[in-house]
Amino acid sequence: MLDGKNIIGFKRSKRGTHTFKTINPILNIENETIYYEAASEEIQEAVSLAQQASAIFAETSYKHRAKFLMAIADEIMALDQSLIDVYCSETGLPEGRAKGERGRTVNQLRMFAQILEEGSFVEASIDTAQPDREPVPKVDLRKMMLPLGPVAVFGASNFPLAYSSAGGDTASALAAGCPVIVKGHPMHAGTGSMVSSAIIKAAKDTSMPEGVLSHLNSSGHEVGEALLKDPFIKAVGFTGSINGGRALFDLAAQRKEPIPVFAEMGSVNPVVLLPEIMKTENEKWAGTIAQSVTLGSGQFCTNPGILLGIKNSDLDQFTEILATKISEVVPASMLHPAIANKYDDGRSAMQEQQGTSLVVEFSEKTKPNIGRPAILKVSAAEFRENPKLHQEVFGPFSLLVECQNIEDLERSVSLLEGQLTASVIGTTEELRGYDYLLKQLENRVGRLVFNGVPTGVEVCASMHHGGPYPATTDSRFTAVGDDAIKRWLRPVCYQNCPDELLPASLQNANPLQLLRRVDGTLTRAKL
Ligand code: NAP
């Protein structure tokens, strides 16, 4: 089933000379299939097809696009165990995780199909003319959101299904009416390719134009850079490292026509442990945090990488229990040897920083590519002095920052960079007494969690998965949930446009029965 080819429009192609293989991190051996990195003419062809498809795809009805997304979900499910097997062989993740992530992926596609059926994502707004208004007549103005054009999506290493070929970025961009070119992640080239083939099958079955999706193999920066520099590409979706996201953001800004790069990057997701609750619930929270730190070998952007508490006997007890709970976790394989090595290096670098000491570490290196959990601790004073301690170590790692008092804790929080999330653990009464701390956290994050851990991101309308830089390159947008579609849309206003020339969403008769803002009031009524 796997042929290692690129998918250029509806064709499969292998014109490049550079090849690569994926790795089974558990067995520490290469998987069989040889992948052909996309050659420059294949990249150009994919972009040109996307450009040709762009206008036709943008004109498809919302219901037609919804049918396409539903068909993609069905085709992914039809891949059945073969997809799960390839996923597991390329990631070392267990079958349960693969199935869970597949469930999330198809649910996201179905969610965007519902958003299309409902239609209000175009934010139709009408201000009717007032020809008799004094001193100047008011013109007729109508506004709605339209697709940006072809989008480049960089598959994410840590979500081979939910944030790769048919993941949240692709699903939301296709829903918006933007063709997508997937730059596959080299670590799960087979999983990505199978899912892209499913998208192509769905595109043909629902009569979508060729070029609505292409999939490029790559195992180096060249393909991604060439894609991003192409003038027909109008936006980028990315999940990965700060270095990678920032490099792509800078490249996009240097283009003759700069384009938005929606990059979701690093986050340490601080968890603040308030003193009152630590008196009675430190055992419970030590267990919950140990699970959250080690979930999926810590390879989540919402992994709690920094814990902050007030140093006293309750926190000492919490630390001891946390150490015990962490040492009970059986370490699992990481996604790839490169990620496992980077984790080992990052953890060692932290241990070498002045003032850090080990709370617990799984030191036995039983098998290759294992993510050995570790917790370090450091005083708040040392933490504030050393920005290296504020950085993400991608894996099952967390740094406990011991503060002398609440002022010490607040000063430490004030030095944190932008984050996807922050969590506060406290009793209801004590939470009321920490307005300043909560405001500080609110200013730095996209999601504030009360008495919970940051891992586990619900996909729904009220989710915000974003945050100030460097968590993302644009804190106004989310990568998860309904509003993810907004990244790929731009407003267009029509002034005094004849009714028959307006898009259906803005016509007087409201043929799509959309909920529209008419002269300031939300209504489905005709004009
Ligand atoms: P990455 O190195 O940022 O790469 C992500 C994707 O972007 C890959 O397809 C990569 O292409 C491409 N890319 C990176 N830098 C590029 C550049 N300068 N120009 C063009 N393309 C570029 O992330 P990763 O491979 O997923 O994992 C590496 C590290 O990223 C992890 O160890 C971890 O530290 C971090 N990470 C963080 C999160 C998070 O959510 N916070 C998630 C995933 C990874 P090629 O691989 O083909 O070169």
Image (cartoon, rainbow, N blue to C red):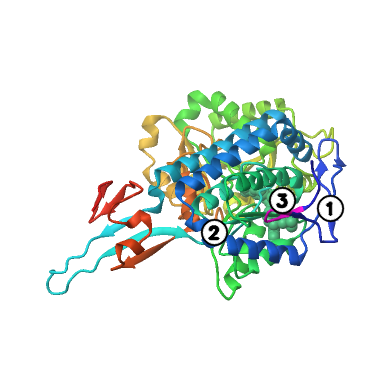
Circle 1/circle 3 CB separation < 8 Å: no
Of the four image quadrants, the one with ligand 1 is bottom right
In the displayed structure image, the side of residue 518 where residue 37 appears, left or right: right
- Give the distance between the C-alpha atoms of the residues marked 1 and 2, in whole angstroms: 31 Å
Q: Which residues are magenta?
A: 6-11
Circle 1/circle 2 CB separation < 8 Å: no
Residue pictured at 55% horizontal, 35% vertical: 456
Residue pictured at 67% horizontal, 64% vertical: 227
Say few, some or many: other residues with alpha carbon within 10 Å of mark 3 (under 14 / 14 to 19 / 20 or more): many
Mark 1, residue position: 20
Kindly report which numbered mark, 1 or 2, lies closer to the viewer in this rendering: 1
Q: What is the quadrant of residue 386 in the picture?
A: bottom right
Q: Where is residue 401 drawn, in percent x and y?
A: 58, 42
The yes-or-no answer for disc 3 within 8 Å of ligand 1 is: yes
Q: Amino acid at mark 3?
A: His
| Quarter of the image that includes the N terminus | top right
- Can the viewer see residue 293 in this picture? no
Instruction: Indicate yes or no whether the magenta region holds residue 511.
Output: no
Mark 3, residue position: 185
- Give the distance between the C-alpha atoms of the residues marked 2 and 3, in whole angstroms: 20 Å
SS under mark 3: loop
Q: Amino acid at mark 2?
A: Thr
Looking at the image, which is closer to me, 47 or 100? 47
When the figure is inspected, residue 105 is found, relative to residue 258, above or below; the finding is above
Which circle marks residue 473 in the picture? 2
